[in-house]
Amino acid sequence: MADGKTPFFASGSSSTSATPAAPAAEPSLEEEIEQLTQAEVKKMKRASNLRNANGVDYAPWMNISANEEEKIRQIMKEKAEARRKRQVQEQGVSGALAMDSQAQELSGGGLRTKIIDGEVELEWVTNSEANTKGFLIKRRPARTEDFDVIASYEDWGPLASKGVDGGAYRFLDTTVSPGGWVYRVTECEKNGAQNDICQALVDVQTEEEQRGAVIAAISIAVLGVAAVVAGIALDPVGGY
């Protein structure tokens, strides 16, 4: 070309492609604790600096001492450790639980439970079982990690697949003892794969705890009735 400039279509061979940035490394436990602590401290200091129109502090009690900051750090440490422990647990989870096992454990979404005379009834429903052989019922004590298989489609017929269209399933755990328990239902496929599909946390009370709950409920009801009667006595015509 007359001006000596290199055409744009000829300059590509000398250019270099951009190298994508490497993903940021996950902070260490200590770094995460410090980040959480400083964020919480900053938030509390911001609140302590707020003043009303007269210049009076809204929350002067929120000024943070060194001891209080250390308490915050301990809370953040427990929070960070719990999050990391949950991550490790979910590495061993498959199927529908892979994304929301904690939410299902707390809410019982997908797995309905009922306590009947100290025994736990489980119920779940499927919409499709194109490759399903049957289901496993697993159980572990709350705040532990390892599940035990307590029932299998291989030795209990009602857990075998109901067919390609799925269906409703029930299982009654008659071996459970008082305490907190996490139940999990696992689907077994014909190719040998397993998928965890739902789970729930159940609290089985002792007879003494059940009686205590009933007594507490009755006491609250009695107090409510007494309050209503007292209100009528003080204002028999309802203010009219």
Image (spheres, rainbow, N blue to C red):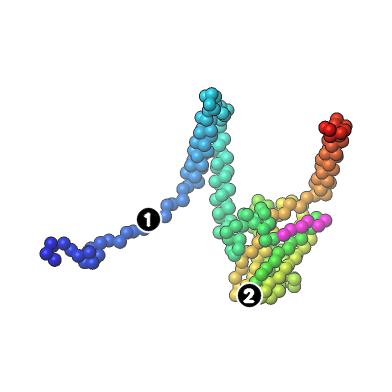
Give the residue type at disc 1: Ala
Q: Does any portion of residue 133 appear in the rendered image?
A: no
- Which residue was labeled with disc 2? 130
Name the side, left or right, on which 147 lies relative to 226: left
Give the residue type at disc 2: Ala
Looking at the image, which residue sits at the far front? 240
| Tag shown at residue 32 | none
- Which residue was labeled with disc 1? 21
Among the 4 quarters of the image, the one containing residue 200: bottom right
Q: Residue placed at 56% from the left, 49% from the top?
A: 83
Q: CA distance from mark 1 to mark 2?
A: 42 Å
The residue segment tinted magenta is: 112-117
* Quarter the N terminus occupies: bottom left
Q: Residues within 10 Å of mark 2 (few under 14, many from 20)?
A: few
Residue 196, image x, y percentages: 63, 64
* Towards the viewer: 15 or 25: 15
Name the side, left or right, on which 23 lies relative to 112: left
Name the side, left or right, on which 85 lies relative to 169: left
Among the 4 quarters of the image, the one containing residue 138: bottom right
